[in-house]
Image (cartoon, rainbow, N blue to C red):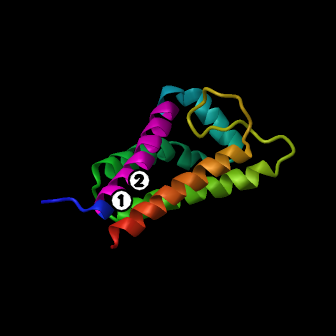
C-alpha cells in the first residue's frame, strides 16, 4: 500500500510530537522525585501527577506508530492544550515556578518560550490532522 504525500506529512508531524512526548515522559520518570515536587509547585493535583508521564508515553507510542488515528492526535492536542492553559495561568504569578515540562532537571522558571513551544506542537498536530483528512 502506497503512502500519499498528505499521509506522510500527517505521520511526520504527529511523529515529531510523539518524540517530544516520549522525551518529556521519560525525563519525568528519570527525575521522578524532583519532578513531583515541581509538578506540585505548578499546581498539578496529586492524582494526576502519576498519570501525566504515563499519558505522555502512551501518546508517544500511538503518535510515532500512527496507531489510533485520529483519536491519538486529538488526545495529544487536548493534553497539550491543558498543559498550555496551566502554563499561561502560572505565568501570571509574580515568581513563576520552575518548568517541569521535561522532568525535574531544571530550575529555570516558566517563560513565554514554554507557551510558544506548546503552540508549535499544537500547530504540528493541527497539520497532522488536516493532512490526514484529505
Q: Which residue in the structure is indicated by mark 1?
A: 10
User: Residue extending furthest right?
Assistant: 94
Label 1, secondary structure: give it. helix
Please tell me whether residue 14 belongs to the stretch shown in magenta: yes
Q: Main secondary structure of the magenta part?
A: helix
Relative image position of residue 78 (x, y in whole percent): 51, 61
Q: Is residue 44 visible?
A: no
Relative image position of residue 20 (x, y in whole percent): 47, 42
Along the horizontal axis of the image, is 94 left or right of 122?
A: right
In this view of the protein, which residue sits in the foreground, 117 or 52? 117
Total marks in image: 2
**Image quadrant of residue 128?**
bottom left
The residue located at (57%, 59%) in the rendering is 81
Look at the image and give the residue range highlighted in magenta.
7-28
The residue located at (63%, 55%) in the rendering is 84
**Image quadrant of residue 88?**
bottom right
The residue located at (72%, 41%) in the rendering is 110
Relative image position of residue 52 (x, y in whole percent): 50, 46
Q: Which residue in the structure is indicated by mark 2?
A: 13
Amino acid at each position: 500500500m502506497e503512502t500519499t504525500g498528505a499521509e506522510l506529512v500527517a505521520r511526520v508531524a504527529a511523529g515529531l510530537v510523539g518524540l517530544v512526548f516520549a522525551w518529556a515522559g521519560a525525563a519525568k520518570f528519570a527525575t521522578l522525585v524532583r519532578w513531583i515536587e515541581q509538578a506540585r509547585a505548578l499546581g498539578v493535583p496529586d492524582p494526576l501527577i502519576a498519570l501525566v508521564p504515563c499519558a505522555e508515553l502512551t501518546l508517544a507510542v500511538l503518535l510515532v506508530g500512527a496507531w489510533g488515528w485520529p483519536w491519538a492526535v486529538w488526545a495529544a492536542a487536548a493534553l497539550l492544550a491543558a498543559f498550555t492553559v496551566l502554563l499561561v495561568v502560572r505565568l501570571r504569578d509574580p515568581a513563576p515556578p520552575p518548568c517541569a515540562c521535561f522532568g525535574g532537571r531544571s530550575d529555570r522558571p516558566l517563560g513565554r518560550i514554554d507557551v510558544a513551544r506548546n503552540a508549535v506542537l499544537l500547530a504540528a498536530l493541527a497539520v497532522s490532522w488536516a493532512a490526514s483528512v484529505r
